Every structure is written in C-alpha cells, then in structure tokens.
Amino acid sequence: MAVKKKKNRKRITERDYIKAQRRASRLEEIEAHGKPVSFRPVVVRSKKVYDRKRVKREDF
C-alpha cells in the first residue's frame, strides 16, 4: 500500500498581499525619484537649548 504524501499548499494571506503591495509601491517611488523619499519630518534640535549630554561631551 502506497503512502500518500501531503501536498504543501502555500496560500497568500491578506498580510502577505499588503506587504507585497507596499514593497512594490516603494520600489516604484524609488525608481521615479532616484532615491527613497521620506515623508516623516526630521526634528532639528536647537543648539541654543541647554543640553547636559552635549556639554559633558564637549568637556572631554
């Protein structure tokens, strides 16, 4: 009697689909602009504000 092998069926989940779409969108964006585009605003710290860590680094 032959032993039946289980077929390993991989299914694409909703999570996998979303991940693939995001990756494709990101790659298209990089191709269009020539570099990755970041939409998060970068916070620039004022040098006038007192910062204890910076003062300690400059002492050494």
Image (spheres, helix red, strand yellow):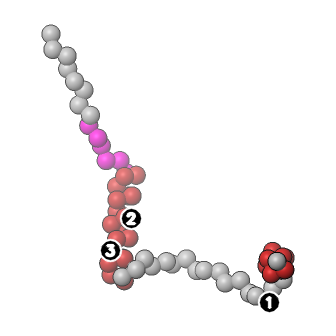
Q: Percent position (x, y) of residue 4?
A: 20, 20
Kind of residue at disc 1: Lys
Kind of residue at disc 2: Arg
Q: Percent position (x, y) of residue 10?
A: 29, 41
Residue 48: image tag: 1
Res. 31 in view:
yes
Q: Nearer the viewer, mark 1 or mark 2?
A: 1
Q: Secondary structure at mark 3?
A: helix
* Residue 34, picture quadrant: bottom left
> Would you name the residue on which mark 3 appears?
28
Give the number of marks: 3
Near mark 3 (Cα within 10 A), the count class, few <14, some 14-19 or many ≥20, is few
Q: Quadrant of the N terminus?
A: top left
Q: Is 5 covered by the magenta stretch? A: no
Q: Secondary structure at mark 1?
A: loop
The magenta span reads 9-14
Residue 22: image tag: 2
> In this image, 46 relative to 14: left or right?
right
Kind of residue at disc 3: Glu
Q: Percent position (x, y) of residue 36?
A: 43, 77
